[in-house]
Image: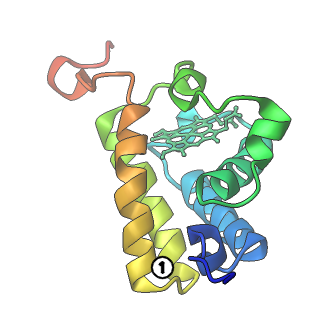
Amino acid sequence: MTARFLTPFERLGGREVLHRIVDDFYARIDADGELRPIFPDDLVPGRERQKLFLEQWLGGEPLYERAHGPPMMRRRHLPFRVTVPGAERWLTHFEAALVAEGTDEALAAEIMTALRPLAMRMVNTREVETQQGGGA
Ligand code: HEM
């Protein structure tokens, strides 16, 4: 018997589909006035690393690890100011990119359920400036 379950990566449609989703996701980040400033001027290198990481995370080839070593995602995000509202925006854009690609609803829900705690683990800054002001 060779029957086996498909990975989420295979169910999504593989590399080409994932790359379209990540490109769309990054276009949404680029257009987001709140999130864009925390990203570097050039979005392309990060976007390409995101493709490698997500392929690996969804059960495809371990491309990220091969190219960049252990993911250690929280640590890699420490230089960037990630707040809870920022993580929510990140998740909203990712979900919108999945929907725009026509991802099966059950699969999209599964992916978002697994991504949420991961995104929240990247949070490294408490958002206080709305109460306390961000300085003059
Ligand atoms: C499930 C959640 C997330 C995943 C899987 C993820 C994944 C990644 C990956 C793979 C990279 C490239 C790391 C590298 O090799 O240098 C990256 C970079 C980055 N991420 Fe995330 N991330 C997540 C959440 C977030 C959130 C919530 C924010 C901010 C709101 C954020 C902001 C950034 C920034 C600013 C970079 C640097 C981009 C660059 O170097 O071009 N990430 N992320």
Residue 89 horizontal side relative to residue 20, left or right: left
Name the kind of residue labelled 1 in the image.
Val
Judge whether 33 appears above or below 16 on screen: above
Taking the spot 42% from the left edge, 43% from the top edge, the residue there is 119
Q: Between residues 114 and 3, which one lies in front from this camera angle? A: 3
Q: Residue furthest right?
A: 67
Asked if ligand 1 lies within 8 A of label 1, the reply is: no
Dot 1 lies on which element?
Answer: helix
Q: Between residues 23 and 6, which one lies in front from this camera angle? A: 6
Residue on which the image places disc 1: 99
Taking the spot 76% from the left edge, 56% from the top edge, the residue there is 61
Residue 50 horizontal side relative to residue 130, left or right: right
Residue 133 horizontal side relative to residue 58, left or right: left
Q: Residues within 10 Å of mark 1 (few under 14, many from 20)?
A: some
* Quarter of the figure that contains the C terminus: top left
Q: Between residues 45 and 57, which one lies in front from this camera angle? A: 57
Can you see residue 127? Answer: yes
Q: Give the percent coordinates (x, y) of residue 2.
A: 69, 81
Quarter of the rendered structure image containing ligand 1? top right
Taking the spot 55% from the left edge, 21% from the top edge, the residue there is 75
Taking the spot 39% from the left edge, 33% from the top edge, the residue there is 121
Judge whether 49 appears above or below 129 on screen: below
* Quarter of the figure that contains the N terminus: bottom right
Can you see residue 42? Answer: no
